[in-house]
């Protein structure tokens, strides 16, 4: 068990952002916003730390006492930085090594969901070791359309919607060549929703230590036909319905699934659970984001605001997750 972390206005906080992943630009925006909020909150020793190969030396040279993680993608959201911080015995925000690694791997996330009887779309995993069987595997996929995704990327990097079986093989091959593997997922027609989940760091809210925020429905306007990178990070490219236009029964059910998913993945502090709702009103978990975006167009701050929590209050809550045992 970790010892409780005492954080005050003079604590030396390093906002880790940037990094080495394909999501660097988004992380730079998230980190700057969080850093600005910490300064507004009076944390006078908060400073930005652009994560590179010299991270250990930078953290020691700057005498950082707590790491506020605003990283996205590989080498930040996948458990690698979390493991490094564990070795340094440096408290950090968000989920620990295990949850971060599990959530970053779409195939492993699917396995955890299925093991816990949580609903998720039908999928087939194809990695580079299946090279000689690409055509044979894709020919067995009878459901169209499908989503083709890299095994371990975030922010919809490398994701494609495929509506014609004739195009599936080439897109799978391209995805594997670029990212080392692909996951082919049955496309679910219906509302795309996302649900923020928070873990209390102080007295329980309404007796619950983990609770779901209001549901956000996403209606992307991108040519891709789904909530892709462009729709996520370009103002005006997505219509946000908050709260989502779902029945009270579906809303409650989806929020319960989000909390159960948070627990099953062993997340800490906060996370965001993405889902699709089918024509019968059944939610299906797509993935879990352990370090959700904190940009001006990001989902988590919008959901928090709908729940009556300002951006700065959300940032302070995330900061205090440094004190939660991983």
Image (cartoon, grey):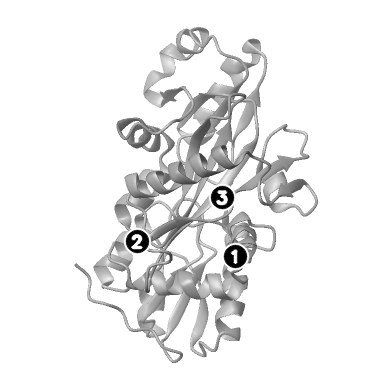
The disc placed on residue 22 is 3
Which x, y percent locates residue 33?
62, 71
Q: Residue at x 64, y 25 (%)?
A: 189
Residue closest to the eye, 73 or 294: 294
Distance from label 3 to label 1 (Cα)? 14 Å
* Residue of label 2: 82
As helix, strand or loop, the secondary structure at mark 3 comes to loop
* Residue of label 1: 30
Q: Nearer the viewer, mark 2 or mark 3?
A: 2
Above or below, 325 against 166 in this view is below
246 vs 82, left or right, is: right
Residue closest to the eye, 141 or 76: 141
The image shows a total of numbered marks equal to 3
Upstream in sequence: badge 3 or badge 1: 3
- Which of the 4 quarters of the picture holds residue 145? top right
Q: Residue furthest right?
A: 236
162 vs 47, left or right, is: right
Q: Residue at x 42, y 49 (%)?
A: 259
Upstream in sequence: badge 2 or badge 1: 1
Q: Determine whether label 2 and label 1 are within 8 Å by CB.
A: no
Above or below, 326 against 91 in this view is above
Which x, y percent locates residue 42?
54, 89
Q: Residue at x 62, y 11 (%)?
A: 165
Distance from label 2 to label 3 (Cα)? 18 Å
As helix, strand or loop, the secondary structure at mark 2 comes to helix
């Amino acid at each position: 068990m970790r010892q409780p972390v005492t954080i005050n206005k003079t604590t030396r906080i390093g906002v880790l952002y940037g990094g080495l992943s394909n999501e660097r630009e988004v992380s730079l925006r998230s980190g700057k916003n969080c850093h600005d909020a910490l300064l507004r909150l009076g944390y006078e020793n908060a400073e930005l730390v652009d994560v590179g190969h010299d991270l250990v030396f930078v953290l020691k040279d700057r005498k950082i006492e707590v790491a506020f993680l605003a990283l996205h993608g590989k080498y930040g959201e996948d458990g690698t930085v979390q493991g490094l911080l564990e070795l340094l015995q440096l408290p950090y925000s968000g989920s620990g090594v295990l949850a971060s690694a599990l959530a970053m791997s779409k195939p492993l996330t699917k396995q955890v969901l299925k093991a816990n009887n949580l609903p998720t779309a039908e999928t087939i995993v194809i990695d580079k070791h299946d090279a000689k069987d690409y055509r044979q595997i894709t020919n067995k996929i009878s459901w169209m359309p499908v989503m083709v995704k890299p095994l371990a990327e975030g922010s919809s990097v490398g994701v494609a919607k495929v509506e014609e079986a004739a195009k599936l093989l080439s897109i799978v091959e391209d995805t594997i060549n670029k990212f080392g593997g692909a996951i082919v997922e049955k496309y679910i027609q219906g509302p795309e929703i996302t649900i923020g989940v928070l873990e209390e760091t102080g007295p329980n809210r309404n007796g619950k230590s983990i609770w779901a925020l209001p549901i956000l429905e996403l209606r992307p306007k991108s040519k891709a036909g789904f909530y892709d990178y462009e729709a996520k990070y370009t103002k005006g490219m997505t219509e946000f319905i908050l709260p989502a236009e779902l029945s009270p029964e579906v809303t409650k059910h989806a929020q319960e699934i989000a909390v159960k998913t948070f627990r099953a993945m062993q997340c800490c502090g906060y996370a965001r659970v993405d889902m699709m709702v089918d024509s019968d009103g059944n939610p299906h978990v797509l993935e879990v984001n352990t370090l959700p975006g904190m940009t001006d167009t990001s989902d988590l701050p919008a959901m928090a605001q709908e729940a009556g929590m300002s951006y700065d209050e959300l940032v302070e809550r995330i900061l205090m997750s440094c004190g939660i045992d991983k």
